[in-house]
Amino acid sequence: MLRLITLTSALALTATTALATDIRVGVSPGQHGEIMEEVAKVAAKDGLNIDVVEFSDYVVPNQALADGDIEANSFQHRPYLERQMADRGFDLVEVGTTINTPMSLYSNEFKSPEEIPDGSTIGIPNDPTNGGRALLVLQQKGLLKLADGVGLVPTVLDITENPRKIKIQELDAAQLPRSLDDLDAAMINTNYAIASGLDPVNDAIATETDSPYVNIIVVRKGEENADWVKPLVDAYHSPEVKKFIEDKYNGTVLTSW
């Protein structure tokens, strides 16, 4: 009997140890970090301890993941990941979807795209994917026209019609909110807008529609079946996290599940 109790206790201890896993998840400032903090609270109930690591730009989280400095990241959409892997050779893989955050146009001076005058300067992110996304939104709003067939990553070289002679200024995505005083308008990702105090509902003068840019959780290839991956995704897709997103962001951040 003593042996049976000892064996049973050992098995229970092993099971508990297997659940007590520590991982580091990279995020960008704003809603990605805020949501992951809530995910961490849910995951902790199942023994998954998440250290949320915030990065100030869009390049470092994938490099940190590839280098093994973190176990996962949650900050980017599929087109951005695909471009990063093609350009930098990262061997990364998507394991779950998260949120969609429509990109919006902001201005301290004008109230609509129609008010933006000839010769104005509009800021866009300087990374290829988000810069291309910004140009597509500017086309949606009638400010310029892009060449046919450019897909999701057009560049300024793909502008074929620019009747208002709009000047496009490419800046680091995180700098765009702080640069609004020096620009006539800027295309800003929702996470950086919220982090800088902008309200996407009340402050944006135009917002992206029909967006294919759903955000994702990413890990190194070969680790997609690690024992912590499903608990991480399940915690993100939990009712508690969904309610947090709906209550906090009031429709400016959309869940994918």
Image: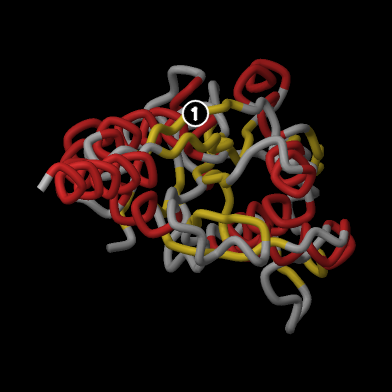
Q: In the visual, does 113 lie left or right of 181?
A: left
Q: Position of residue 169 (x, y in %)?
A: 81, 37
Tell me which colouring the rendered structure shows. secondary structure
Question: Relative to the observer, which residue lies in front, 214 or 15?
Answer: 15
Residue 182 at least partly seen: yes
User: In the image as oriented, which residue stretches furthest toward the left?
Assistant: 1
Question: Which quadrant of the view contains residue 45?
Answer: top left
- The residue positioned 43% from the left and 68% from the top of the image is 210
Name the side, left or right, on which 78 lies relative to 202: right
Q: Is residue 195 above or below residue 255?
A: above
Q: Which residue is mark 1?
A: 52
Q: Residue 24: x percent and y percent?
A: 55, 34
Name which residue lies at 16% across and 51% down: 4
Is 217 located above or below residue 109 in the figure? below
What's under tag 1, amino acid-wise?
Val
Q: Is residue 252 depicted above or below 255 in this figure? A: above
The mark tally for this picture is 1
Nearer the observer, 49 or 29: 49
Q: Can you say which quadrant of the picture contains the C terminus?
A: bottom left
Q: Is residue 125 visible?
A: no
Residue at point 70%, 24% (across, down):
175
| Quadrant hosting residue 63 | top right
- Residue at 73% in and 42% down: 68
- Residue 56 percent coordinates (x, y): 66, 25
Residue 86 position in % (x across, y down): 83, 67
- Say what secondary structure mark 1 lies in: strand
Q: Nearer the viewer, residue 37 or 142?
A: 37
* Front-most of residues 248 and 144: 248
